[in-house]
């Protein structure tokens, strides 16, 4: 049951990315290119996605658990740490450079040629090497003087 | 030829938002692409792994079929594989350090007014803008 809905969610997400044009990197880079020929499409995509999700969060707040029975995610953390800031900067730099982020890189994998496969491979490597780096930064910034 | 790009953007965006809503209300999860992909390589319980894998299979297969059927296979990804490889590394590393990417922070975070989601989005939009400015207009490699 959960897996069928996870599959359907992934499918709908992917088709939404395709329909909105987010698998076309020139639309993404066009949005980020405020000094060139600016393309506002991405604002409509983000806005269109946030509206149903904002309603979903309100529905979730009034229910004890999800349809499958697992609890909803806890309250969002409010801590803006070094990892969030530094990570978002690195992510944004890469996003601008290739015009791809994790969702669209998977949605376009089957028609993006060698480049799409290379991106997915190095992105996965990045996801894996991030964990030890993240933990080190957390330890460093939370307890700067604590010993090992 | 005038393409109603913003209408397609809004329509696709609504589909993405409905997908995220389904994942929250039915499965009880946050739909964050980087977290779901990264989670496949962690030692988690089998049920969670299969759930994540099902999501990824849907995300890869269905847009592929629809793209071929509708001829929307244009991606315009640069053919410079060094650029692609470096960008991928930055995206993976950054998304995991920040604990989320465009879907997790941008859509799921902003929609519940999470301060982390909003700040992450501000930071990566700024960095993305600078990145395009530097690599396209100053350096000229993309």
Image: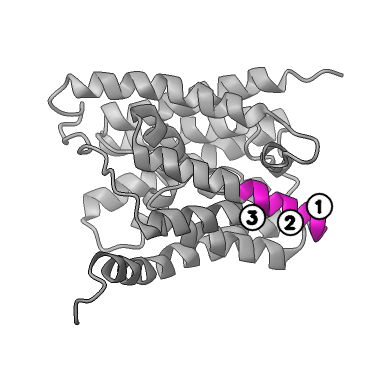
Quarter of the image with the N terminus of chain A in it: top left
Q: Percent position (x, y) of residue A75?
A: 22, 37
Q: Which of the numbered marks, if any, corresponds to residue A116?
A: 3
Q: On the image, which quarter does residue A36 sit in? A: top right
Would you name the residue on which mark 2 appears?
A: B134
Q: Does the magenta segment cover residue B132?
A: yes
In terms of secondary structure, where does tag 1 sit?
helix
Q: Residue at x 44, y 33 (%)?
A: B107
Is residue B78 in sight in this rendering? no
The answer for how far apart the CA atoms under marks 2 and 3 are is 23 Å
Up-down relation of residue A106 to residue B73 (above or below):
below
Instruction: Tell me the chain of label 1.
Output: B
Residue B82 lies left or right of residue B33; in this view the side is right
- Element marked by disc 2: helix
Q: Do circles 3 and 1 both sit on a common chain?
A: no
Label 3: chain letter: A
* Crowd rating for badge 1 (residues with CA inside 10 Å; few <14, some 14–19, many 20+): some
Residue most extreme to the left: A64
Q: Are marks 2 and 1 in contact (CB under 8 Å)?
A: yes
Report which residue position mark 1 lands on.
B137
Give the image's coloring scheme: one colour
**Viewport quadrant of the C terminus of chain A:** bottom left
Say left or right for B134 vs B55. Answer: right
Whole-percent x, y for residue B45 in the image: 21, 56
- Residue A108 among magenta residues: no
Please determine if labels 2 and 1 lie on a single subunit: yes
Q: Which residues are magenta?
A: B128-140
Numbered label attached to residue B71? none
Residue B24 visible (yes or no):
yes
Kindly indicate whether the residues beneath marks 2 and 3 are on one polypeptide chain: no
């Amino acid at each position: 049951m959960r897996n069928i809905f996870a599959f359907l969610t992934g499918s709908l997400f992917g088709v939404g990315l395709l329909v909105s044009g987010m698998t076309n990197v020139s639309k993404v880079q066009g949005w980020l290119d405020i000094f060139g020929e600016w393309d506002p499409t991405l604002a409509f995509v983000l806005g269109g996605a946030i509206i149903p999700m904002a309603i979903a969060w309100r529905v979730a707040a009034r229910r004890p658990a999800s349809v499958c029975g697992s609890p909803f995610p806890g309250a969002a953390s409010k801590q803006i740490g070094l990892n969030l800031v530094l990570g978002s900067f690195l992510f944004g730099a890469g996003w601008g450079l290739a015009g791809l982020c994790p969702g669209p890189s998977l949605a376009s994998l089957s028609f993006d040629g060698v480049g799409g496969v290379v991106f997915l491979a190095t992105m996965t490597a990045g996801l894996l090497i991030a964990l030890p780096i993240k933990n080190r930064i957390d330890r460093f910034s939370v307890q700067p003087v604590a010993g090992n | 030829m005038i393409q109603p790009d913003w209408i397609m953007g809004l329509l696709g965006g609504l589909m993405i938002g409905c997908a995220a809503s389904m994942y929250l209300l039915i499965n009880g999860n946050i739909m964050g692409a980087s977290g779901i992909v990264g989670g496949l390589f962690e030692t988690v319980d089998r049920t969670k792994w299969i759930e994540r894998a099902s999501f990824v299979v849907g995300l890869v297969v269905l847009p592929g079929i629809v793209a071929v059927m509708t001829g929307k296979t244009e991606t315009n990804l640069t053919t410079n594989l060094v650029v692609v490889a470096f960008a991928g590394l930055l995206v993976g590393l950054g998304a995991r350090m920040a604990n989320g990417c465009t879907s997790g922070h941008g859509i799921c975070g902003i929609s519940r007014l999470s301060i982390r989601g909003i700040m992450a989005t501000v930071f990566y939009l700024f960095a993305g803008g600078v990145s395009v400015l530097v690599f396209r207009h100053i350096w000229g490699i993309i």
